[in-house]
Amino acid sequence: MELFEGMSQKDRDEFRRVCNKLMSVCFLCKQNSAARGDYYFVLRQKEVFARYLDVLGYTLEINEEYGVVQIVNRENYNHLHLKLIDSMILLILRILYDEKKRELSLTDVVVNVGDIQEKYLSLKIREKQIDRTTMNNALRLFRRYNLVELLDRDLSREEARIVIYDSILMAVRVEDIRRASELLARYRKGGADSESFEEGSSGQLAQVSE
């Protein structure tokens, strides 16, 4: 293909691998040591990636300030539909990220399972904590999409630590938080059903491929 003229066979093979990975996980984050090389490869070949993905209906978004690469499907295909509780955990991770950044100005934002549970209860959606299986499944799902890293294997412990990557800023934008806050207020008053709340709080993670 003309698109790959001048690209070595090694780089073509690497392009194929990284492109497939990007379409599978949606985000590449420089903070993630396992994805850092792929992130920089996309930056070096961003024109080729952008043109190739454009043909497939994807827009390549690169935020070098955050150190994040993301693809978004313009045709609204390949969306990941989150359950209500998964949407809430994602939103809570975004809120905790903002709070920790303001308080500590840290490079890496680290929270624990107890922080998530405490924030969930403070939102007064349910009177009991998120069950362990649900929490475990949600966090491992978000790890798959390069939104978090799990520092401890046993997520049943409140002290289990989670790194929240800067990619959360692109997965859940400010407008998503505002929309979710409005729906949450209606939900508490009984004016919004769980389906509409879930739809409004899922954020841009719905753009990833399943």
Image (tube, rainbow, N blue to C red):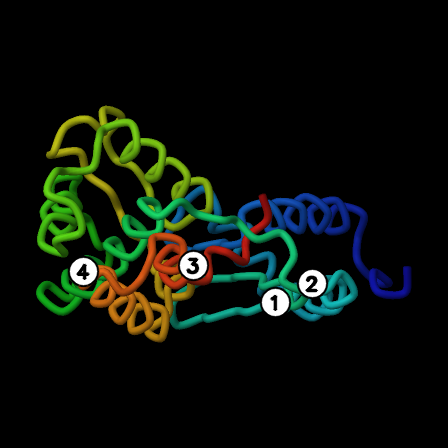
> How dense is the environment of label 2, judged by Cα within 10 Å: few (below 14), some, or many (20 and up)?
many
Circle on res. 188: 4
Residue 177's spot in the image, x, y percent?
30, 68
Compare residues 17 and 203 and report the one nearer the observer. Answer: 203
Q: Is residue 137 above or below residue 124?
A: above
Relative to residue 58, is residue 115 drawn left or right?
Answer: left
Q: Looking at the image, which residue is at 29% across and 27% down? A: 133
Amino acid carrying label 2: it is: Phe
Circle on res. 60: 1
Residue 107's spot in the image, x, y percent?
23, 60
Q: Nearer the viewer, mark 2 or mark 3?
A: 3
Q: Is residue 128 above or below residue 9?
A: above
N-term mark: 4 or 3 = 4
Callout 1 secondary element: strand
Say if mark 3 contacts mark 1, CB within 8 Å.
Answer: no
Disc 4 from disc 1: Cα separation: 37 Å
> How dense is the environment of label 3, judged by Cα within 10 Å: few (below 14), some, or many (20 and up)?
some
Q: Quadrant of the C terminus?
A: top right
Circle on res. 49: 2
